[in-house]
Amino acid sequence: MTSEHALALQSPRGVFSTRIPSTVTFAIALLLFVLPFAEFKCKLPSENQDAIIKIDTGKFSVSNTGLGLAFGSDWKLNIPGGNPFQNERSDEWKQHAKSQKPNYYAIVALAMAVLGLGLSFIDAAPFAVITTVAGGIGAGSLIGLMLDLHKKSSDIISGLQNAGNSLDASYQVDLGLRFTPWFYIAIIAMLVAGVFSYKRILSAGR
């Protein structure tokens, strides 16, 4: 049998066994880091009528992106649009907000997304092994980030409340940590990227 006949008998590689799916999903995971990952929703007392800024219950929040958590950026004050004091209050918030430290889980997850994306462009089985591991570690690190923020939420809330109280006595708020859909999509993207990379390994072994 000639080599041409042997190649003709081989089953063609499906698109999911190529580098394209893992490259795309790692890119999606990396891009999601610029979006809010976690936020603290604030519930203002309904009887409060003396606040300088009138804020609808459930809309006032502070948030942080994946990059912000990785590099230690301060939590961002989110005031409903259209408020004339929004920029002024946001600047005052930054002055009084407690400085945040980089989160190591977020750093590892970000590094795995960058590593996975970079190596996904190389169409070679050994690199597919690395990107498979990177996808798994990245997803695990994001889950670790979630657990770590829940563990540290009391300290974060204390700092946020001090910043709010320094602006106005009316900022007596109850804060609750929640994770955005972008955060959960990032976990899924990292897992899917790892699965696609694993398919490349299986395809190369045929």
Image: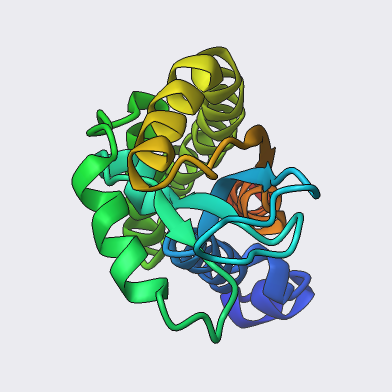
Q: Nearer the viewer, residue 128 or 84?
A: 84
Residue at the spot x=52%, y=57% of the render?
36
- Tell me where residue 25 sits by quadrant: bottom right
Tell me if residue 1 can be seen. Answer: no
Say if 157 sits above or below 27 in the image. above
Q: Residue at x 60, y 28 (%)?
A: 146
- Depth order, front residue of 61/115: 61
Quadrant of the frame with the N terminus: bottom right
The image shows residue 79 at horizontal and vertical percentages of: 53, 67
Q: Position of residue 78 (x, y in %)?
A: 51, 62
User: Which colour scheme appears in the figure?
Assistant: rainbow
Of 20 and 2, which appears nearest the observer? Answer: 20
Foreground of the two, 59 or 48:
48
Judge whether residue 31 can be spotted in this image. yes
Answer with the quarter of the image where residue 59 lies.
bottom right
Is 15 above or below relative to 132? below
- Count of labels shown? 0
Residue at 54% x, 21% y is 153
Q: Residue at x 80, y 49 (%)?
A: 46
Q: Percent from the top left, x then y, of residue 58?
A: 75, 55
Where is residue 93? Give x, y as percent.
31, 51
Location of residue 6 by image quarter: bottom right
Residue 194 as seen in the image, left or right of residue 46: left
Q: Is residue 51 left or right of residue 46?
A: left
30 vs 96, left or right, is: right
